[in-house]
Image: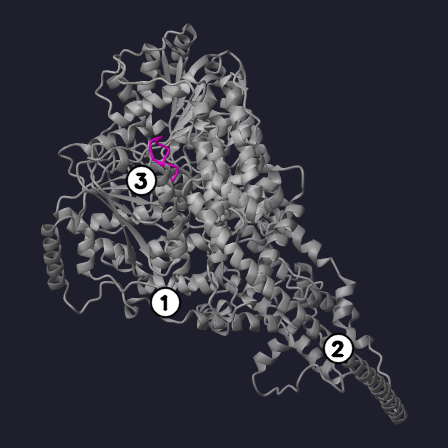
Amino acid sequence: MNGDAVQPIVKPTTREQYQLLLLRWTTLRTQGATPASSPEMAELVTILRKTSAEQQVYQTKFALLRKARMGKPNVDTAVLKTQIQAFQLLSRGLDVPDYLQETLIKTSGTASDNEDQPLFAPVDIDQDFEERVLRAGVPPPGGFPPPQSVTDFCEKIISNRITSRLTELERLPANLGTLDVHNLNFDPSYKVPDQDDALKIRALLEYKSLMLLTKQKSLRQHIVFNLASRSDPVSESMTRRFSNRRVRVKTVHDVRLSEQIEIGQRMNKERQVRDRKIKELTAFRDHAHQVNLSTQNRKLRNQAMGRGILNLHNTIQREEAKRGERTAKQRLQALRANDEEAYIKLLDQTKDTRITHLLKQTNSFLDSLTKAVKVQQGDMTTTIDDDPENKEKIDYYKVAHRIKEEVKEQPSILVGGKLKEYQIKGLQWMVSLYNNNLNGILADEMGLGKTIQSISLITYLIEKKREIGPYLVIVPLSTLTNWTLEFEKWAPGVKTIVYKGNPTQRRELQNQIRMGDFQVLLTTFEYIIKDRPILSRMRWVHMIMDEGHRMKNTQSKLSYTLTTYYTFKHRLILTGTPLQNNLPELWALLNFVLPKIFNSVKSFDEWFNTPFANTGSQDKMELTEEESLLIIRRLHIVLRPFLLRRLKKDVEKDLPDKVENVIRCKMSILQAKLYEQMIKHNVLFVGSSTKTGMKGLNNRIMQLKKICNHPFVFDEVENLVNPNHETNDNIWRVAGKFELLDRILPKFKRTGHRVLMFFQMTQVMDIMEDYLRLREHTYMRLDGTTKADDRSALLKEFNAPDSPYFMFLLSTRAGGLGLNLQTADTVIIFDSDWNPHQDLQAQDRAHRIGQTKEVRIIRLVTEDSVEEAILSRAHAKLEIDGKVIQAGKFDNKSTAEEQEAFLRSILEAEEVRKRSTSNERDDEMDDEELNEILARSNEEAILFNEMDKERYELEGPERERLITLPELPAEYQRDIDEIQEEIANKKLKEVETLGRGTRRGNGGRVYYDDGLTEEQWLNAVDKDAETLEQVMEKQRLKMDRKREKRKSTKATSEEEADAPTLEATLEDYQEEEEDEEEEEEAEEEEVPVKAAPIRRRSKRGSATPVATTPEPPRKRRRGTVGRVETPVKADSEEPADTYNDAGAADTEPTTLLAKTTQLIESLRGLTVTDSNGDVRSRTELFETLPDRTEYPDYYDIIKKPVALATVLAKAKAASTKGGSGSSYKLLTVKNDLIQMCRNAMRFNEQGSDVYNDAEVIRAEVEKWYKQNK
C-alpha cells in the first residue's frame, strides 16, 4: 500500500479465503487496530458482519427445509407450469429463456414431500453435508448470485469490449500498411509490394463483422421467441395416443362365438369350391370326348384327300420342271449369245409371265428415254418408229450421239503438256455431248486425270467452238489449290477467277464478275450457296463439278440451289465413284445432268434395282441368272450414252500394280474380354470404383469397332490397365492390330518404304501418335480439323524429295479425297469404312499417275469380329458397282462378249461365296507367311526374316507378344457372369428391403427415362407439330417392336439364344447410317458455308496439325473425357454441378430459368452495324437450328447442334422437372452456349460476319458465367 490508499478487499468465496481473512483480522486486532483508526480493519469488520448475517440466513433456511421435509407436501402450481414450459422447449431442442431460468432457480430451494413417492431420498446429516445442502437447493454462504444480474454483467463486459474495439478500429489511419521482415523483396522503388494492404483488409473485415452484432441479436431473438411460443396440438396428441385408446374387455363367450362362425364359413366355402370343380371337370370331360371324335373323323377324310392331291401335283411338277429346264437352258444360251430375236421367240413359247413383264417394262422405259433424249437435244424432227419389231433395232447410243466429231489433237492453247490417248478419247466424248446438246458424267477411275480432261474441254470449246465463256467450275475446297495450279500450268491463256477469300476479297472479285472480264470462274461448293445472289445472275455456258457424288442427295441445299437459281447451257460431273451405295444415288447424278431424261427415280429404281436387292439395299428377292442378265443389260444400255468410265488397268499400262491383302489380326485377351462383355451383355466392366462397376453403352456396333481398334479408346479401361498413363509396351500389347504393326512397320522403314495409314476414328489416331513417338517413327497427321492452307503445306513437305517423314496418318473421310501422295508406296487401311468407295479413294492417294513403285495395300481386320461383317457388307456394295458400272465397260469400245464374260464371272463368284460357309478360317498367319505378303522382292523377304530373328533374340521366348491374362488387373480376371450375378443379388436385396409391392406400378411397364437421345429430344422440342410426350411414345413403341422381334428371332434357335448374333444389329446400324448420314462427308471444305475449323485438343496429341518429330517416351497427356449416358456417346462431355444444400437444389431450376432468360435477352441486345449501314442483332442467326432440308450438310459436320431456342427449352424443362430430377445446371447453360459458338466458328469461314458474331457472344457468355458462378 502507498499512503492511506487502501485496496478494496475481495469478498471470499471459499473456506481457505475466509480463514485467511480471519487470520488478518486477528493480527490487526492484536496490533491494537480499530475500525476507526484503520481502514483495512473497517473493511474486514464490514465483510465479517455481512458474512455473519448471511450465515444466519443460511441457518434459518436450513431449519425451514428440515421442517418442510417433516410436514405435508405443498405443491406450487406456478412452479409446475414453469417447469412444463421448460420441458416442452427442451424436448424440441430449444434453449430455455432467461426469465424461465430465473424462476426455476428461485424456486429450486422449495420442495414438496410425498408420503408415497418422496421427491428426495432420506438425508444423512452426518455425511456429505455440503454436497447435500447444495443438492437440496440451499444457497451457499453469501447466497446465490442473481442469474439475470450475472448475465447482464457479462453482456455489459462484452459490449464494452466491442465498443472499445470499434472505436479503436475507427481511429486507425486510412493508409494503414504493413511490412513483413521475413518476406522482404528487394524490388525497385517504383514497384508496389504485393502484400502492402493485407493488414488494412483484415481490419476492415473485422470492423464490418462487429457492425453486424445488432442484426444478429435481433434475428436470434426473433427465432427463439417465435419457435418457443408455437405449439402443435396434433403432434402433441400423437405422442399421447396410448392415453386415448379404449380397450374392450374380451369374454369367453365372444371368443367361442367367433370360432364357430369362422368354422362354418370355411366349411361352406370348401363345399362350394368342391362342387364347382366337380361340375367343371365333368363338362371338360364330355367336351373333350366330343372333340376327339370329330377330330378323328375329319383327320381321316383330310388324309385321304391330301394323298390324292399330292400325287397329282407331284406328277405335274415333274413334267413342268423337265420342260422348264429345257426351255430355260435354251433362253439362257440365246441371251449369252446376244441373240435377242431367238431369245424373244423362246420366251413367247414358254409363256414366262415374269420375264415377259420385265422385258416389256424395260423396253417401254427405253422408249420413253429415247423420246426424252430427243427432247433434251431440242430436236424432235426425227420420228420414232412405233413398230415393235423396229423398236428393238434402234441403237440407243447412236440416237444420243448422232452428231459425231472426231478429235485428233489437243487444243493449241493447252500448253502444259501432251494429252494421252485415252484423254483425247475422253475429250472427244465430252465434245460429242456438247454437239448433241447433252450432259454427262466423266467417271474415270481416280488418278486418270479428270482435271486435265476438263481443262482440255474448256480450251477446246474456246478455241474450236468460239465459246469464250463464262465457264463455272465447282470443286471441293481441298482440291481448289490443285485446280488453280493445273489451270496455271495447262491453260495460262485462259482468264480465270479463283473465287474465294474473306468478304472483302470476294466483293472485289464480284465487281470483276459483273464486268464480265473473265472466262472461267473457279469456286467451291460453299460459295455457290453463300454468294448465290451474285453468281446466279450469270448465264453460264458450261458448268463442271468435281467430286460430283456430292449431288447424290437431291434434297440437299447444294442440289436445290443449283437447280433452282442457276442457269447452265451444259453440265458435266466429274466423279471417281458414280455408284457408292444404291441406284437412286446414281439416278440423282443423272437427274442433275439430264433432268428431262431421268425425271422419275421411282421407275428407274423399280425396274433396275431388283438384281441387287439381295445385297442389303432393298428387301431380299431372289432372281435367276437369266433375269439378272436381262435387267442389267437394259441398265447398261440406259447408262452408256451419258457415262464414261475407264480403269487404270485398262488405259495406264505403265502404272505399277496395286496389290491388296487382307490381314486378319488376333484379339488380345483384354480385347476378347471386352468384346465378350459387349456382345453378351452390352456393357463394359469398368472396375468397382463406380456405383455398380458396369457401364452401359449405346450403339453396340460402334463400341465393338472401338474394341477391335484399341481398348484404350475407353478411358475407364485405360485407367485400370495403365493407371499412370505412361506410354510403354502395353500400348501395342493390348491390341492385336498394334501388335501386328509393331512387327511390320520396322520392316517398311528399314527397306525405305513410306506408309499412308487411314483411320475412321481420331481417338485411335491419338493413340497411334503415342505409339509412333514411343518407337521414334517420324510421322505427319491430317484429319477433318486440319485447315485447307495447312493441308497444302503438309502435302508439299511430305512429297519433298528429302522428306524425313516415314508415315502419314490420315482420316479416311478427310484425307481420302483430293490429295496427291504418290511418294508413298504402302497404304494401310487400319479399319474399313462402311462405304467401300471411301477406302478406294484412300488407296488411290498413292496409286495414281506419277507412281513409280508397286503399291501394296494392307487392310487390317480383326478376326471373328464385327469388322469381318463390315468388310463383307462393303464387298456387297462393290458388287453393285461391278455389275452396273464396270461390267458395262463404259469406254464404248468393249465387245458384247467381253461384257457378258465379265458379268458372268461376277455372278458365278457370288454364287460360290453364298455356298461357302462363313465359319471357315485359315490357320494363324506366322511371320514367314506375313513376310511373303509384305516383301516386294526376294531380298526384302530375306531381310524381313533376319529382322524377325533379331527380334526373337532381343525379346526372348518367355514373354508373349500380346498381353496375357495374369498381367491384366484383377477386375478383368473375373467372369462377367459372376459380376452380373452379384449386382443382380444386390439389387434383389434392395428391392426386398424396400418392401414387396412398393415398386409395383399400375400394371404396365415402368419407364425410368424418356428413351430419346439428345438430338431427338432437341428436335422434338423444336417441332410444334407434336408434343414431347408423343415423340416419347413413338420411340417406346419402336423399341418394343424391336424387342419383340428379337424375342421371336431367339425363339427359333437355341444357339441364337445362347450367343446372340450381329446380323440384325448390323442391318439396323447400316440402315441408320445410310438414312441419317446419307450425305456424310467429313471434309471441312464440303460444308455449305466455308469452314475454318477449330481443331479439338486431342487426349494424346498436340492441338496443332503440324508434323511431329519423335520424342522420348514420357507420360502421355491423355485425360479422361466424360460422356453423357454413356452410355459412352462419344460425344456428352459436360460436367454437372454438385449440390450440398437441399434447399439450393429445390430453388435452383427457377433461378436457372430466370438467369438463362436474362442472359439470352442480354445477348439479343448485342448489335452491330453492317457494311450497308443497317443495325442488326448478333444473335439473329443463332435463334433456331438450321433447317435440315436446306442445310443437310450442317448436321453431317456438326454432331451436337445448339441454338438459343434449345438452350431456353432445356432450362424450362429443367425448371419443370425440379432440382432433383434435372441435370441441366448453370455450368451446362454456359457449355451449351459455348458449343453453339464453336459450331458457328467451325462451320463458317474465319473473318465472316457469323464467325465474328460467335466470338463476341462467346466472350459475353464467359463474362456472364464468371459473374454468376
Numbered disc total: 3
Q: Earlier in the sequence, mark 1 or mark 2?
A: 2
Q: Which residue is mark 2?
A: 295
Q: Secondary structure at mark 2?
A: helix
Residue 891 is inside the magenta segment: yes
Tell me if label 2 and label 3 are in contact, CB under 8 Å.
no
Q: Earlier in the sequence, mark 2 or mark 3?
A: 2
Q: Is residue 838 left or right of residue 1018?
A: left
Q: Which residue is mark 3?
A: 842
Q: Amino acid at mark 1?
A: Tyr
Residue 177, relative to residue 52: is it above or below? above
Q: Amino acid at mark 3?
A: Ala
Tell me if label 1 and label 2 are in contact, CB under 8 Å.
no
Q: Which residue is mark 1?
A: 972
Residue 22 or 362: which is nearer the viewer?
Answer: 362
Highlighted magenta segment, given as a residue range: 887-895
Residue 614, relative to residue 642: is it above or below? below
Question: In front of the other: label 3 or label 1?
Answer: 3
Q: Residue at x 36, y 36 (%)?
A: 889
| Residue 570, image x, y percentages | 44, 18
Which mark identifies residue 821?
none
Q: Is residue 190 left or right of residue 230?
A: left
Residue 546, quarter of the rendered image: top left
| Residue 85, image x, y percentages | 73, 65
User: Quick one: label 2, few (<14), some, or many (20+) residues within 10 Å?
Assistant: few
